[in-house]
Amino acid sequence: MKNITYLLGAGASAQKLPVVSEMPTRIRKTIAKLKVRQGNASYTPLKRSPIPNEGSLKSLYGDLIDALEWLAYACDAHASIDTFAKKLTITGQYSVLRKLKITTSAYFALEQELRGFDNRYDAFFASVISASGSFPERLRILSWNYDNQLEMAYSGFNNGLDSVSDNALGLRMKTKFSRPRSTTGFCVVKLNGQCGFQEANGLTQYNFVDNITNGSDLDSIDTVLLNYGIATYGLNVYPTLSFAWEEEKNTQIRIVDTAVAETKDTNILVVIGYTFPFFNREIDRAILDSMPNLEKVYYQDPYASKLINRIQAVKSETNNLEIIPYEDKDQFFLPYEL
């Protein structure tokens, strides 16, 4: 029996969420929708700490619209959000980095509320989960994505639980901010954390919206907005979107070490929608070089044939490694060894 690891990038959510090249346009479309809602929003102060006393839904809409316009400009000016984040880290602009994380988290929460989840996750879970509801113990998932697509899709297989948090537990999900717990077999490791925030003591974590819907839940937009205000104005609140290369003081798990420990016995690697960007190379190399028994890589991407050399550049030893491109994007690839 082979041990199989999936490595997911932005392309794995591309049927609902934008890839890098689409970000500025999609953000501006969301801004246009928010401006319509802002026009009908109340001026009544929310009186919700830590939001300023005069803060209302209308004023919060204005704050978020301004932040999203800033984010769209940042996406125009940089290769990706991750690139901008790395730049801010190198230059020590941590308050701007915090703004980037909070605004990005709110944006992805809004996109998910408006568009739902990529149905390819649904088909994937239906294929790999047994009739008794369990995952194969020899399957792992590593994700570079900070969205909640996995949790949203898994809700339909988890007794209908409609909480992102509950479904993260069901997926045995691990991030930097997870409570340390010993697990064996299947798990999901989110290398960049997820869209949300936590209190400074680390005891309580929040998603920008925790109630799972599959698109068009306009009422939840106000929930995203309120949580955006709490995350923005809260002095003792920290984003749980945390890039894998960041050193965080208030985390409980070293996420790269966790990813290595969970996947070191991998025989088959399935890469979906991930292009191995240069700024992630050290981490990708640490993970792939810690797979001494890796025999085969299935690389699913519309441009997989042209991107194979990126895997070869990341992994130190590829002489005996079979790399198979798979360019269809209708469903997630399921290896014959599964």
Image (cartoon, rainbow, N blue to C red):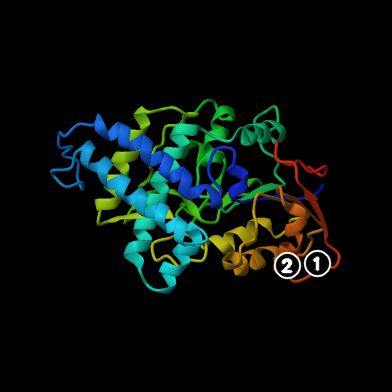
Image position, residue 123 (x, y; %) = 67, 32
Q: Residue sitting at 41 percent across and 27 percent down?
A: 217
In the image, is 288 to the left or to the right of 42?
A: right
Residue at image x 40%, y 74%? Answer: 91
Residue 315: numbered disc? 2
Quadrant assignment, res 284: bottom right
Secondary structure under badge 2? Answer: loop
Residue occupied by mark 1: 318
- Residue 199, disc: none
Q: Nearer the viewer, residue 121 or 127?
A: 121
Rendering coords of residue 78 (x, y %):
48, 62
Q: Determine whether 124 is above or below 247 in the image.
A: above
Q: Quadrant of the C terminus?
A: top right
| Secondary structure under the numbered disc 1 in the rendered image | loop
**Label 2 is placed on what type of residue?**
Lys
Q: Where in the figure is residue 198, as x and y percent of width and height? A: 36, 51
Q: Which image quadrant is residue 31 in?
A: top left
Crowd band around label 2 with a 10 angstrom C-alpha radius: few (<14), some (14–19), many (20+)? some
Q: Are marks 2 and 1 in contact (CB under 8 Å)?
A: yes
Q: Nearer the viewer, residue 64 or 181?
A: 64
Horizontal arrangement in the rendering, residue 85 relative to residue 228 (left or right)? right
Residue 143 in percent (x, y) is at 59, 51
Q: Residues within 10 Å of mark 1 (few under 14, many from 20)?
A: some
